[in-house]
Amino acid sequence: MAFSINLLHADPRTDLVIQTCGKVRVQNVSNYFKYYSSITDYMQDEIYRNKFAFKDTGEPPDRLYVLAQCMDDLTNDECAMCFAQISTLIPSCFPSTGGRVYFDGCFIRAENYSFYREALAQEDTKRCSGIVNKGQEFSVAVNEVLSKMLLKAPSFRGFASKHETSNGISAYGMANCWKILDHDLCSICLSEAVASALSCIPSTEARVLNAGCFVRYSDASFANDSNGEYSKEEVFSYITYIMGVVLISVLAIGIGICVGKLTYRRKIRLKQSKETEDLLLEERVQYMQFKYATLDTATESFSETNRLGCGGFGEVFKGTLPDGREIAIKRLYISRKFQVQEIRNEMEIIGRAQHKNLVRFLGCCFTSIDSFLVYEYLANRSLDLILFDPAKKKELDWKRRFLIIEGTAEGLEYLHKYCQVRIIHRDIKASNVLLDLRHRPKISDFGLARFYSCDQSLVNTAIAGTLGYMAPEYIAKGRLTEKVDVYSFGVLVIEMITGVQNNKYQSEKTYETLVTCAWKHFQSNKVQEIIDTSMTIEDAEEIERVVQIGLLCTQESPNLRPTTTEVVQMLRKKDVELSSPSKPPFTDELMELHYLGSLDQQHPSTFGKKMWGYVSGTYMIPKNIEEGDTVLIDTWEANNAKIITWINNSVEHLIELTELKPQAMSISSFIGQLPHSSSGVSHFEWVLDSSTSHYISPNSLSFTYVSPLSSIPIMTAGGTPIPLADGTIHQTSCTDTPKQNGVTERKHRDIIETARSLLLSALFLNAVSYPLDLLFVFFWVIVK
């Protein structure tokens, strides 16, 4: 018989299953923290040696009893890693008398009374998967697995792992009693647990969490054995043989190496103990405080080779801790004018969010210059890197895509409903959904929306999100509810089905977006035409049902969109009847652009020629535009109004506002910016295409300053002047002598002069309430 062990991909199974806390408060919380720190420091060695430990200390009634154990299939190193993470969660229950925490790989419990020989308790519970397999073969296989584990585990040190197959359908199981229980108590606990597990059938996976034992079954292998093909006796015998060989080898090499290793581990243990004590006794927070030196060493001084990317919140680096754990470190863009304590309060809220579909928040670090957040590292990184890559997207078959959609919905449901403090994400998209080695989804950047800022400053009230994923009521009126996340999730669902990124969707019908395209295909029963061609269609009806769920989430009215709890139920239960989705936002407006020739009737006095209005995303100028027409584009992005004057002769030219950045001079010329004003206009930008030196130039070019809350201009430069609220009239113009063909060459000097004129006119409106803004922009114009 041949064996192979891959230690490079150890899996301590640290996914949180459930955490419960007691309802009775202790009398002296400070002593409780001290007792817990002392106990966990002692238990680290015991856990590593025996994968089991218990200890109590203190004086009644606040005497603290703690028990922890790993599943027997974990190695000693994996057990130590699991304990290191699970032991940080119990303090979140204080000042109650204690609680329980179950990971898939280990368990810990703390109370103010001796519970060591408890086999059953009122708090015992179970977790049944929402995915079902109603086949008789699967039920038979599960029954075989559970019955054999019930007979074997009490006599085999409280542990059993089984794999059974019925007519090609497999079932896997694991049963583990806490080692402090004797044979009879273990049998009692497992009997109740197996009965509970059987009640979960036909669910494809179930976990039973009793006071004295843990039982799990699944249709996929999850135990850390040699591919799940050998019995537990064979694996245990082989591990015992290997441990014996290793022990003899270590003794032969010399006691010196052993002493060195023990000394090194003792130093690491003392260092971790000191950090834990600082965490529990000084900060009273629910996450780990990392030292900057630790993060600096882990990232090799934040080297470019360890840099994973950069987003709206800051840079992200990959790091490796001294114990071998890989972590992701986010360096935030936060202004130092805000108190670190305020940020810590936010981090404490994020630290309490624990769910299998949320990226685990491990801790943070604050220096006089930077602020860092530390998360678990996921090897497959973000979903967009796979879903939108022509080669890699083939890894995502329909089953995996469905599980990603379902897991993301469950993570959002937890944030909206079950988290201690309600969290609205505000930026759900593929790049914020990370995948582990098994392609299980985990939502990242939750709870950070208050830190979102493009100019690297802390913003509390600005709209945060990504254009194309934001709900219409949010970008138009700033109305923030959980339905904003539901809308973004719906866009993500359509992307998962089509394999196309929403903001990069292109259609022959230029007024269409990805969502409106999906809605039209659904209405005409042609959903199969938009399914990603790289994905094999295994269940066309199920795919069409998921498309319908995505369209229900992207309905224009937030009241019509389902809650995340309803979405989860729709995905789990195929018998839930779905309503017909109404139209997505902007459908009528975008379709009108296909045949309307002018908006003169809306604002007849505004322009000498036509004005074209657009909302959201990527824009195409209508084919019947004439020379000299003014094109108004209101992006509704973060309350900003943007003005694009159409002066390029190509009617097929595309303008993508998300790419117009001040630094990207090769794409556009960024002329000016106004700070936030009391009128509701955050800033305006005048953008001219600098890719060519030829421009259409009638006698006068028109520029329009527009409120982001409506499409009605409040000031123009050129064309017909508009009276303002105070009766004042402002007008400037830029006149050129046209050539015979109506085309002339402009120099950058003329462009800047025109921009100066427009900026100074606009600044006049804000000069009374914002004199500092006037000085700032005037200084900018002079410098230019």
Image (tube, helix red, strand yellow):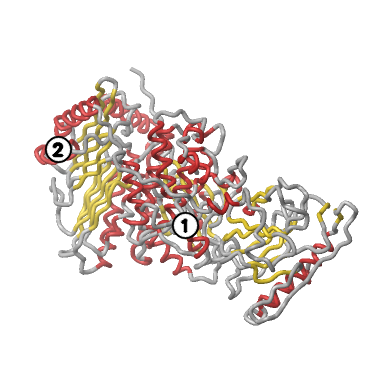
Q: Position of residue 77 (x, y in %)?
A: 36, 40
Q: Position of residue 287 (x, y in %)?
A: 38, 58
From the image, which quarter does the C terminus lie in? bottom right
Q: From this viewpoint, which residue is outermost toward the front?
A: 601
The amino acid type, in three-letter code, at marker 2 is Ala
Task: Work out whether mark 2 precedes mark 1 in sequence or the reverse, and give the earlier one.
Answer: 2
Q: Which one is closest to the eye, mark 2 or mark 1?
A: 1
Residue, x 45% and y 36% (percent of image)? 525
Q: Is residue 299 visible?
A: yes
Total marks in image: 2
Quadrant where the N terminus lies?
Answer: top left
x and y, in percent, of residue 469 in the image: 51, 52
Q: Residues within 10 Å of mark 1 (few under 14, many from 20)?
A: many
Extreme-left residue of the structure? 184
Q: Quadrant of residue 39?
A: bottom left
The Cα–Cα distance between marks 2 and 1, rounded to whole angstroms, is: 42 Å
Indicate which disc residue 503 carries: none
Q: Relative to 597, is 435 above or below?
A: above
Q: Is residue 636 left or right of residue 107?
A: right
- Secondary-structure class at tag 2: helix
Residue 256 makes an appearance in the image: no
Residue for point 53% across, 44% down: 514
Name the residue carrying label 1. Answer: 426
Residue 58 occupies quadrant:
bottom left
Estimate the x, y position of residue 45 in percent, counting from the top left: 30, 46
What amino acid type should be assigned to the residue bearing mark 1?
Answer: Arg
Quarter holding residue 710: bottom right
Q: Which residue is mark 2?
A: 195
Name the side, left or right, on which 511 lies relative to 422: right
Question: Callout 2 environment at 10 Å: few (<14), some (14 to 19), or many (20+)?
Answer: few
